[in-house]
Amino acid sequence: MENPTISVVQATPVLFDLDKSLDKVSQWIEKASYQNPNIVLFPEAFIPGYPRGLTFGTKVGNRNDSGRETWLKYWENSISVPGKHIDKLGSIAAKFKIWLVIGVVERGESGSLYCTVLYFNDKGILIGKHRKLKPTAAERVIWGEGDGSDLSVYKTPFGKIGGLICWENYMPLPRTYLYEQGIQLYLAPTADQRENWQHSMKHIATEGRCFVCGCNQYVEKKDYPDLTGEDISEFGDVMCKGGSVIIDPLGNTLAGPLWGKEGILTAELDMSLIPKSKLDFDPVGHYARDDIFKLNKLK
């Protein structure tokens, strides 16, 4: 197995603008391509952006018309799977011959929205997607829940890839299910900009004995479109400061964390570290005690 190179893109989406966000994806992948990555990772909800601070006109027991207009604009700029915008992302992956993993807001068949991660191979084929199992707090107003049927790990020429979205990574059982599938490159697109998030990334790497790539956006207040009825004045100039990072299976930081700007983190991953790390710990092997504990996935 070859040692892959991964590029983690910490960039600013064009909020609420699907087509311009797609153009930005292409631009950033072109920048990353000079470092010859095998795989490029983008943040949670990069298309059409993570709507931090917005209320969509909702309070418990009440919604308003301006909030529905904001929702409509967000909905119109979300991605249908399959569709022409999926084809565009696939063509970008094929052009640069990279595996592309990207967080999007997906428009479901009935019209509900989901926080989703898409997986494209280097031929531009969409090989899988994962819908977030449990949107956090006010995210539940705008995103539905995934059903868990797509919690998969994908084989590539350079290892098994997969991951969870943002605070799904706090859920021990989904993590364990990925470990049981032999995940080696654990991808964690997120919107969590707290420094404490770094502890979780290191913990997962050492727990799962896998490489972990955390990927966040960098967004300033000026990047937001004018949305009637929405007030983000309580926030500072920086809405999301980033914190993207690449960590090895023993918890060592290979690149990042990157704070306060757009940029690309790139690292070559020494895959021999995975079996080396399992000398003294394997969460689903000699340290599992599956004679006592057993994970049963019902769906």
Image (cartoon, grey):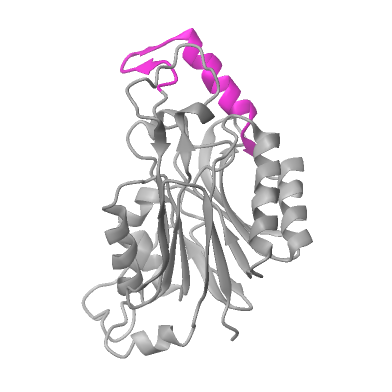
Up the image or down, 267 lies above or below 85; here it is: below
Q: Nearer the viewer, residue 219 or 38?
A: 219
Q: Is residue 135 left or right of residue 113?
A: left
Q: Nearer the viewer, residue 255 or 133?
A: 255
Give the residue at x 37% y 77%: 249
Q: Nearer the viewer, residue 65 or 213?
A: 213
| Magenta segment | 55-80
Give the residue at x 21% y 77%: 292
Q: Residue furthest top?
A: 65
Give the residue at x 68% y 63%: 33
Up the image or down, 276 lies above or below 165; here it is: below
Up the image or down, 240 lies above or below 10; here it is: above
Q: Give the percent coordinates (x, y) of residue 244.
A: 43, 56
Q: Nearer the viewer, residue 280 or 131?
A: 280
Say if the magenta span includes residue 60: yes
Q: Is residue 225 left or right of residue 120?
A: left
